[in-house]
Amino acid sequence: MAFKVGDTVSLLSGTETGTILKIEGDQAEVMLEHGFEEWIPIKELVPRKALNIGEVQSKDRPASRLERGKARAHAPEQLEVDLHFEVLVDFPKNFSAHEKLQIQLKEARKALDRARRGGIKKVVLIHGVGQGRLREEIYSLLERMDRISFYDAAYARYGKGATEVELR
């Protein structure tokens, strides 16, 4: 498939969509749905057909991953990332516990990297409560990082299931 600048695409992994900004060799620079640009191999892109505004009414369409909360920028200074595994992949039952954890941690690292590159000062990592393994691993990851501070996110909004990271 030949892609061109302006095409709307999904990532083969099924986790994000975006618009092609530039193509160089076998890579495309894609503006992802949450506002960050990333270079992605063309072989990992899938074309998406654009819909006319009147074709689908909002009440008739399911919520997109972005609307369900995978990664939403509430304001330029904060990024919220839902690390619940069923939000990150299309077929969550096809993964071992170790694979799930690795994918969740990779998503957390990517969000922190994108926030830093985008000048966003706060990232809320929503890990849920569960047995606490993901929270422990996220804390371990954050303890090894420079120029950040982290703490439990607002209890009133997230309960005990989120960690807020401040980037300095």
Image (cartoon, grey):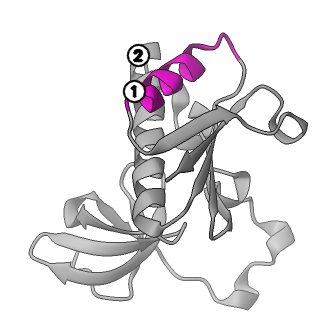
Q: Which residues are magenta?
A: 130-144
Q: Badge 1 is on which residue?
A: 102
Q: Quadrant of residue 77?
A: bottom right
Residue 112, x across and y down, in percent: 46, 49
Left or right: where 142 falls relative to 68: left
Q: Amino acid at mark 2?
A: His
Q: Amino acid at mark 1?
A: Gln
Provide the major secondary structure of the magenta segment: helix
Residue 121, x across and y down, in percent: 57, 59
Residue 97, x across and y down, in percent: 47, 15
**Is 63 above or below relative to 136?**
below
- The residue positioned 81% from the left and 39% from the top of the image is 154
Residue 27, x across and y down, in percent: 18, 69
**Is 24 above or below relative to 125?**
below
Q: Which mark is residue 98?
A: 2
Q: Which mark is residue 75?
A: none
Categorize mark 1 by other alpha carbons within 10 Å: few (<14), some (14-19), many (20+).
Answer: some
- Asked whether the residues under the numbered discs 1 and 2 touch, taking CB atoms below 8 Å apart as contact, a structural biologist would say yes
Q: Quadrant of residue 95?
A: top left
